[in-house]
């Protein structure tokens, strides 16, 4: 078993040096708005690329990300092995967008309407990517909120129906009100890894799991 | 679908699995969204497949427009053994993913409580 695994990994390592262009798996970072997807994407890119420019802006206002953004060939090193992934940060998925909610964040009506229109286009695009263009999913949840939502249930179901490997991340564990167990209870069929993308807590385990799931 | 709307009531469309079986995915989605956009609550006896749910979200997004349509609220029970229905089951039509599904306009339906076995929603008239 161990031997076979070693053999396989050395073959895949040889292959990855030969075909490094094609080897990258496209990993979509999905989850509801405001979960910390972009914060995580930025951290991954900052940790593993030389000029770690941000993937996109982070904000406490929902629907900050309204276009799927890809960072290619991010090489994560684990146990002397390199795992290359394309990180795709996606707009937070929802079934409803009400522009008047943006007005509460001190936004002008024009801007709120535009944000809502871009948000709906972004969510539609994210669903499309999920059906056609990703090889694996990192599902990010804000551990300080209730994970038992319809969007989470549906998205996990959609991901499972496509047999995509999925890693569930319980983000924002730096917050007192966070509960990792609540997420484990909601999705017992998957492994849940706790982290704080903002503070950088437990990132080693996150990278171990990324390598294990998507390597 | 025939409209029998009371002036200040809420119309509920209960759609049987049998009726849905005869429809293509996009026809199902059209039927749901047409009902919801008329202000109705649509209840599906057997729900949608994950693929159809994904398209429902996508089409809903393309139809949202300010002051007119805010999108949908949808509720189903989480499948307890997700992904457990094998190819054989699927071929035989024993799809364990069939689940009661409630869909309504986001501005009129509010989820009060949800767990594995109970969903409580509040439907407002306007
Ligand atoms: N306390 C805490 N806050 C976090 C953490 N990760 C992200 N945040 C904050 O949560 C908010 C949302 O973060 P984003 O990364 O923009 O969230 P997102 O999931 O990309 O959101 P959308 O693009 O709108 O879907 C920001 O204010 C972040 O600073 C965390 O680990 N802990
Ligand atoms: Mg974002």
Image (cartoon, coloured by chain):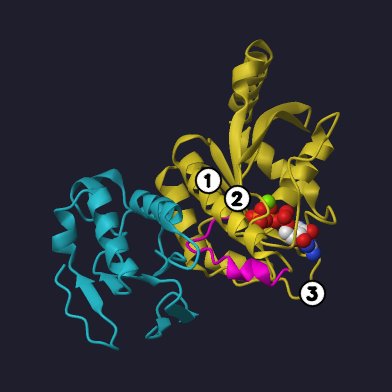
Chain colours: A yellow, B cyan
Q: Sequence order check: which comes first, mark 3 or mark 1?
A: 1
Quadrant hosting ligand 1: bottom right
Residue A83 lies, in percent from the top left, at 69, 29
Label 2: state its secondary structure: loop
Label 1: state its secondary structure: helix
Give me the residue at 69% from left, 72% from top: A104
| Separation (CA) of disc 3 from disc 1 | 31 Å
Find disc 1 in the rendering and name its residue: A126
Give me the residue at 50% from left, 34% from top: A133
Chain holding disc 3: A
Q: Is residue B76 above or below residue A111?
A: below
| Separation (CA) of disc 1 from disc 2 | 6 Å
Q: Main secondary structure of the magenta part?
A: loop
Label 3: state its secondary structure: loop
In this picture, residue A160 sits left or right of residue A169: left
Q: Sequence order check: which comes first, mark 1 or mark 2?
A: 2
Q: Which contiguous range is marked in magenta?
A: A91-105
Find disc 3 in the rendering and name its residue: A176
Depth order, front residue of B1/A136: B1
Q: Could you classify mark 2 by the number of other residues whose Cα lies within 10 Å: few (under 14), some (14-19), or many (20 or more)? A: many
Are tags 2 and 3 found on a single chain? yes
Q: Is residue A19 above or below residue A66?
A: above
Q: Could you classify mark 1 by the number of other residues whose Cα lies within 10 Å: few (under 14), some (14-19), or many (20 or more)? A: many
Q: Which mark is residue A91?
A: 2
Q: Which mark is residue A81?
A: none
Give me the residue at 60% from left, 54% from top: A114
Task: Locate the N terminus of chain B and report the quarter of the image it occupies.
Answer: bottom left
Residue B61 lies, in percent from the top left, at 46, 55
């Amino acid at each position: 078993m161990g031997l076979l695994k070693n053999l396989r990994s050395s073959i895949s390592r040889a292959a990855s040096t030969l075909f490094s262009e094609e080897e990258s798996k496209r990993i979509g970072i999905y989850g509801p708005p405001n979960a910390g997807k972009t914060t995580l994407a930025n951290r991954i890119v900052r940790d593993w690329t030389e000029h770690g420019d941000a993937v996109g802006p982070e904000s406490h206002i929902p629907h900050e990300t309204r276009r799927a953004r890809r960072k290619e060939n991010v090489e994560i090193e684990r146990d002397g092995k390199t795992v290359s992934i394309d990180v795709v940060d996606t707009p937070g998925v929802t079934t409803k967008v009400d522009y008047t909610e943006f007005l509460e964040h001190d936004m002008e009506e024009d801007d709120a309407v535009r944000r809502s229109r871009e948000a709906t286009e972004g969510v539609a695009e994210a669903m499309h990517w999920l059906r056609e263009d990703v090889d694996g999913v990192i599902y990010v949840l804000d551990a300080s909120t209730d994970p038992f939502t319809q969007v989470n249930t549906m998205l996990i179901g959609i991901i499972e129906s496509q047999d995509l490997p999925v890693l569930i991340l319980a983000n924002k564990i730096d917050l007192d009100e966070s509960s990792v167990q609540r997420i484990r209870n909601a999705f017992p069929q998957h492994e849940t890894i706790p982290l704080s993308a903002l503070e950088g807590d437990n990132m080693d385990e996150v990278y171990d799991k990324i390598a294990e799931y998507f390597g | 679908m025939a409209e029998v709307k009371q002036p200040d009531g809420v119309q509920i469309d209960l759609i049987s699995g049998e009726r849905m079986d005869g429809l293509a995915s996009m026809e199902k989605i059209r039927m749901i969204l047409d009902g919801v956009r008329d202000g109705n609550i649509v209840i599906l006896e057997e729900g949608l497949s994950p693929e159809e749910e994904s398209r429902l979200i996508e089409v809903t997004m393309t139809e949202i427009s300010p002051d007119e349509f805010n999108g949908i609220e949808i509720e189903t029970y989480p499948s307890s053994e997700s992904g457990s229905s094998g190819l054989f089951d699927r071929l035989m039509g024993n799809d364990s993913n069939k689940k009661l599904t409630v869909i309504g306009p986001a501005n009129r339906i509010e989820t009060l409580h949800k767990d594995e076995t109970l969903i409580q929603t509040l439907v407002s008239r306007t």
